[in-house]
Image (tube, helix red, strand yellow):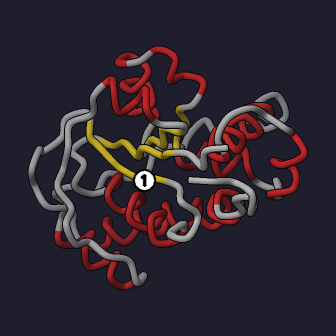
Amino acid sequence: MRVGAILVVCTGNVCRSPYIERRLRDALNVTGITLSSAGIAALEGHDMEPEVAGLLRQHGASAEGFSARMLTADMVADADLVLAAAREHRGAAARLHPAALRKALTLRDLADLLQGVSPQDVADAGAPGSWVSQVVAVASSRRPIVVARQEGVDLVDPIGQPSRVFRRMADEAEDALRVIVPVLSAVPAQTGG
C-alpha cells in the first residue's frame, strides 16, 4: 500500500499553505507521506513571507528551498488529500479536477472530522487506497455526525497584515494540526512508500 501524498492549497502560496506544508513535513517526516503546496493565484517563484519563515523556525521546521507554485489540475489529481486553507481553495481545486471533491477538505474541517478518531479507527475501517486516502475516507464518513462549522473555517489570511495576524494564522493552523498529525503519522508498519 502507498503511504500517500498531501497537497496544501491557499491563495498566493507564500503564507498559509507553506506554513501548513512545512509543519506537516516536519511532523510526518518519518512516515513517507509526500507533501507539497501551491496557490490558486500563486506568486510563482517567490519565497514564503519572512514572517512565516520565522514562525516555522520557532516550531523547529525549515523554510529552506521554498518557491511558490501555481496550482494545476495535475497536482490536484496526484494528491490523496487536498488540504485547503479556506473553502474557496477547496472549490478552486475541485474546479480544476472535479473528482477532488472527494479528497479536498479545509484544514479546520479535517480537524473537526478527525476529532476523537484514532489511528486504529482508520485501520479498522479498511478503506481502499493509500494511508492518506484511508484517513480521508474515515473523515468523510463522519460528515453526517459532525456538524460543519458555519464560521471560523478559513484560516486568517495574513498577507500584508501586522505580525499579530501571522501569529494568529499560525495558532489557528496549530490547533488543527494537533488533531490531524497523530492520525496521519500512525502509518501502519507494513505500509510502503
- Which residue is depicted at the point 73% across and 50% down? 114
Look at the image and tell me in which quarter the N terminus lies: top right
Q: Please determine whether, in this image, residue 191 is positioned above or below residue 83.
A: below
Q: Image quadrant of residue 142?
A: top right
Amino acid beneath label 1: Leu
- Which residue is depicted at the point 82% across and 53% down? 117
Image coordinates of residue 16 in percent, x first then y, are 34, 55
Q: Image quadrant of residue 11?
A: top left
193 or 56: which is nearer to us?
A: 193
Q: Image quadrant of residue 116?
A: bottom right
- Which residue is depicted at the point 38% across and 77% down? 61
48 or 73: which is nearer to us?
A: 73
Left or right, 120 with reference to 79: right
Name the element at disc 1: strand
Residue linked to disc 1:
35
Q: Please determine whether, in this image, residue 140 is positioned above or below residue 184.
A: above
Image coordinates of residue 37 in percent, x first then y, are 33, 48
Q: Please determine whether, in this image, residue 93 is positioned above or below residue 188.
A: above
Count numbered badges in the picture: 1
Left or right, 119 with reference to 16: right
- Which residue is depicted at the point 74% across and 57% down? 190
Q: Residue furthest left?
A: 45
Image coordinates of residue 47 in percent, x first then y, are 13, 61
